[in-house]
Image (cartoon, grey):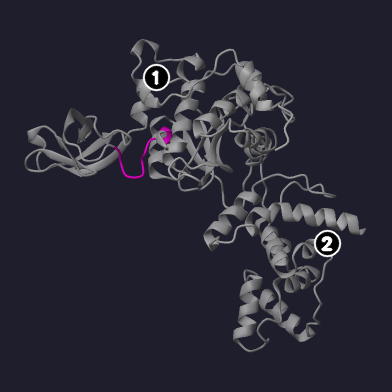
């Protein structure tokens, strides 16, 4: 292997861990989460047929880079090889053969603590190489796990959700500062149809807002497939999916089957949308989150969803529209009900229910009882539903309103060089016959019930 090839491979390896090593204040949890996300992607690895990089390999790249910078990421790089006594290796081999479940890290610690081996002499990579030679590496002795190819057979069978950390915009709350934006996206596994929006926060309200809009536009999915992030594993989301008869499936740790599809979409966002959007930020044409989303919607409609996909050989929107399976289209009121927050509360002797320091008056005969309440966490000024022993009673009426939304449930839409003069996003935006405007779910609920089963996306969004 010549030096140019080695450098090319090293540069690819650095491109994977670059976002991590460039951050100076990552704690262990943040670093692990970033590594996990990187390991779930698919990549064109130089001089290799593989498409993925394991979490363990990424950790090894990080360690190599910390020890020897970019040079250490070249294949075959060895930093002043230290000869390890044969007896040390034999002791490690015996410990693995004694208990094949022992990890290399545990084996090294056992030898060091027992005084059999000096601290720092044995390295994980060295022990691993010897284990491979003796056929006792974990992948050699572990039972083979078979996987069925992951993928949907028709539209609406599997809806993948994920969040992508993207660019920075001016912070609307602090002049002169910038703030990271997050793309919450949903992708139909069969057709690759994509929808998403940018937000300033990586939280449940942003997830809910985009999921509601997907359901309004395209109907309910049979299965929701997402990772184990806090927003996607929340108790509230589980309730929402249960009420709408959607099965919530979480990615198995270290086994992200099928996640490469949405990661591929994010790669296109990076190369095609973000690169152009940054130019518009520099030109002052994108200053706010609303500006950014006003360019992203036509990019989705006119470019991504109208572009022939490399795997399906079809355009996502055309493939979706040609589907023949029936889609479940709930009414706006059914969607609103499904997203209500549910809690158990005690009714005071005077018939008062307290929610988030607010007070609501309910029927007097419920005094002293434990009831189930359902309410809109984004608008606590509304009446709240009251359920007792499986029966719904009159709504409780707000008497004292101190908070207008549940804590941490601020509505997602309330977050506060040389150039050619040609920009892809500007062209796409101008191409739209009608500019699609953002609309909060609350606005949709104010429309007359006669238009609940909206099939026209532009009327809603």
The quarter of the image holding the N terminus is bottom right
Q: CA distance from mark 1 to mark 2?
A: 58 Å
On residue 127, the disc is none
Give the structural element (helix, strand or loop) at label 2.
loop
Callout 2: few (<14), some (14-19), or many (20+) C-alpha neighbours within 10 Å?
A: some
Residue 430 point in image, percent of width and height: 62, 18
- Residue 144 seen anywhere in this rendered image of the structure: no
Q: Is residue 115 above or below residue 247?
A: below
Near-viewer residue (66 or 84): 66
Q: Position of residue 373 (x, y in %)?
A: 24, 37
Q: Which residue is mark 1?
A: 331
Q: Residue at x 36, y 39 (%)?
A: 410
Q: Nearer the viewer, residue 414 or 125?
A: 414
Give the labeled residue for mark 2: 75
Q: Quadrant of residue 131?
A: bottom right
Measuring from the top left, give residue 364's x and y in whole percent: 7, 34
Report the side of 151 relative to 311 (left or right). Answer: left
Residue at left offset 39%, top offset 19%:
331
Viewer can see residue 428? yes
The answer to whether 336 is drawn above or below residue 102 in the figure is above
């Amino acid at each position: 292997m010549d030096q140019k090839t080695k450098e090319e491979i090293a540069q690819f390896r650095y491109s994977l861990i670059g976002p991590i090593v460039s951050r100076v204040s990552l704690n262990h949890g943040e670093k692990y989460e970033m590594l996990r996300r990187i390991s779930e992607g698919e990549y064109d690895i130089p001089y290799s047929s593989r498409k993925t990089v394991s979490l363990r390999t990424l950790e090894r790249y990080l360690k190599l880079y910390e020890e020897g910078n970019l040079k250490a990421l070249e294949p075959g790089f060895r930093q002043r090889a230290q000869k390890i006594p044969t007896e040390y290796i034999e002791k490690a081999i015996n410990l693995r053969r004694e208990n094949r479940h022992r990890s290399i890290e545990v084996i090294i610690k056992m030898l060091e603590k027992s005084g059999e081996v000096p601290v720092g002499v044995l390295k994980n990579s060295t022990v691993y190489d010897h284990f491979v030679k003796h056929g006792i590496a974990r992948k050699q002795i572990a039972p083979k796990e078979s996987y069925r190819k992951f993928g949907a057979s028709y539209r609406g069978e599997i809806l993948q959700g994920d969040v992508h950390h993207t660019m920075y915009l001016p912070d609307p709350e602090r002049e002169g500062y910038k703030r990271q934006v997050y793309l919450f996206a949903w992708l139909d596994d069969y057709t690759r149809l994509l929808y998403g929006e940018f937000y300033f926060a990586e939280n449940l309200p942003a997830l809910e807002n985009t999921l509601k809009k997907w359901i309004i536009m395209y109907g309910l999915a049979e299965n929701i497939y997402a990772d184990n992030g806090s927003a996607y594993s929340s108790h509230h989301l589980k309730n929402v999916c249960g009420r709408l008869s959607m099965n919530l499936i979480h990615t198995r740790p270290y086994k992200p089957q099928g996640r490469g599809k949405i990661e591929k979409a994010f790669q296109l966002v990076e190369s095609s949308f973000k690169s152009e959007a940054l130019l518009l930020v520099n030109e002052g044409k994108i200053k706010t989150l609303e500006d950014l989303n006003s360019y992203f919607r036509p990019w989705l409609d006119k470019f991504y969803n109208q572009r022939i996909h490399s795997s399906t050989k079809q355009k996502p929107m055309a493939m979706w529209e040609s589907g023949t399976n029936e889609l479940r289209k709930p009414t706006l009121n059914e969607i609103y009900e499904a997203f209500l927050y549910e809690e158990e509360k005690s009714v005071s002797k005077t018939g008062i229910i307290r929610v988030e320091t607010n007070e609501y008056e309910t029927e007097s005969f419920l005094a002293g009882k434990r009831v189930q309440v359902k309410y809109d966490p984004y608008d606590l000024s509304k009446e709240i539903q009251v359920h007792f022993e499986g029966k719904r009673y009159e709504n409780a009426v707000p008497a004292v309103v101190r908070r207008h939304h549940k804590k941490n449930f601020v509505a997602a839409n309330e977050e506060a060089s040389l150039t050619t003069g040609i920009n892809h996003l500007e062209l796409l935006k101008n191409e739209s016959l009608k500019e699609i405007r953002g609309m909060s779910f609350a606005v949709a609920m104010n429309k007359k019930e006669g238009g609940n089963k909206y099939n026209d996306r532009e009327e809603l969004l």
